Amino acid sequence: MLEESEARRRLIEATPLGKITSVPLEAALGATAAVTLRARVALPGFDNSQMDGYAVRSSDAVAGAILHVVGRRFAGEESGGGAVGPGTAVRIFTGAPLPPGADAVVMQEDVEPTGETIRLRVGAEPGEFVRRRGADLCEGQIVLREGDRLTPARLGLLASQGLAEIPVRKAPGAVVVTTGDELVEPGPGVELRHGQIFNSNGTLLEAGLRLFGVTAPGRFHAPDDPARLRTVLEQALQAGDFCLIAGGVSVGEKDHVKRVLADLGATGGFWKVRVKPGKPFFFARAGEKVIFGLPGNPVSSWITFLLFVVSSLQRYAGRAPDPAVPGLVPVRTRLAEALENDGDRPHYVRGRWEGKTGLFRSVGIQQSHALHGLSLANALVRIGSGERLRAGEEVIAYLPEDDRWG
Ligand code: AMP
Ligand code: MG
């Protein structure tokens, strides 16, 4: 049985990089940059006013000074308002270029206007309320690195550089294949016979793929019949770069997935990882296609999705996931209760992490079929084999959320 980090290392290594394609900035949120870019426009691009007020010479600007207003200058005006000479000021608005001669701005709240002149209530230091050219960003500075996630602020920065498009690594096309004779597709009026269950993994995994950047995952279903499974898997492998198969990868007599995949030429894989839930997790490649066999129990399906498929998606996108840890958001948290793991596999406990208190508490029965309990959880805490954690102890909780905004 493979250790979790070794499993992740192998599947990250076996995942190809997504193709590079240029997309409009509007379509790039959450994608991963495929290039490193340097600034060609400085920020600010010119010395300008930080306030609505008056551009002055700081040497004139002492409290009580009376200055002659010689003109006005608005944002977007290249010139206008004239220069600031001894004893004079130019009315100026936020973002307008600083007029020649001025080296400071007095904000209008600190000025008493009287017709053509103003009286300063306060003095001004050189550079006060002036936004200097290049103070935020100079030409040639790096604005984006290959592998960076495109957040709203980074996209805004690219727009500030005059760009309308950005090369990104394409998210993979992905399909979810559910397997099992007991499964029925949910829908209005659909009734279950005794022994049947509704297919929940299809919806769960499809939503997971969307959450992590796949736009339109495909869906297939196969019964537990090797010949029909083979036909469906052939179609699924045609349709997606990533193929997620739920169920049929364990040791049951009807668990045909691994055998059928081997017949279809899948290689280079592994089966079984020392983790709970999710031991029967399976991985292989068929040509350029990557194949994940997720255990059929919904909690196992979701946890192995988070622990393994997410890292593979990140690799495909050109980010450099660390195989030692899940590709999720780690937060420092304290346990609201004692938790222990007597088993021989590390256990990912499902629970709720509360930002307000910084506490994590397990929820629901911790069994791999317990989908309702899973739906109440928003975080995972890993408890090593044989580990006993006290209430109040500090641990890392993993949140299945991404960092699209920051
Ligand atoms: P398997 O891995 O195929 O042996 O399935 C393990 C358990 O998960 C069984 O109880 C299945 O009924 C259940 N299961 C498998 N696939 C799904 C699915 N798509 N939705 C809900 N439960 C499933
Ligand atoms: Mg099954």
Image: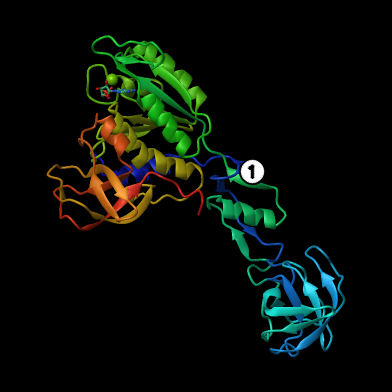
Q: Is residue 61 visible?
A: yes
Instruction: Name the residue rendered at 21%, 52% in the picture.
Output: 336
Q: 247 or 392: which is nearer to us?
A: 392
Q: Quadrant of the N terminus?
A: top left
> Residue 405: percent from the left, percent from the top?
51, 51
Residue 113 x, y percent position in the rendering: 77, 78
Query: Which residue lies under the disc numbered 1?
Result: 26
Question: Badge 1: how crowded within 10 Å, few (<14), some, or many (20+)?
Answer: few
- Figure quadrant of residue 40: bottom right
Residue 189 place in picture, x, y as percent: 38, 10
What kind of residue is marked 1?
Answer: Glu
| Disc 1 residue lies near ligand 1 with CB under 8 A | no
Q: Number of callouts in the render? A: 1
Residue 233 in view in this figure: no
Q: Percent position (x, y) of residue 77?
A: 83, 65
Looking at the rendering, the quadrant in which ligand 2 lies is: top left
The structure residue drawn at horizontal position 50% and vertical position 39%, both measured from the top left corner, is 213
As drawn, 300 above or below 43: above
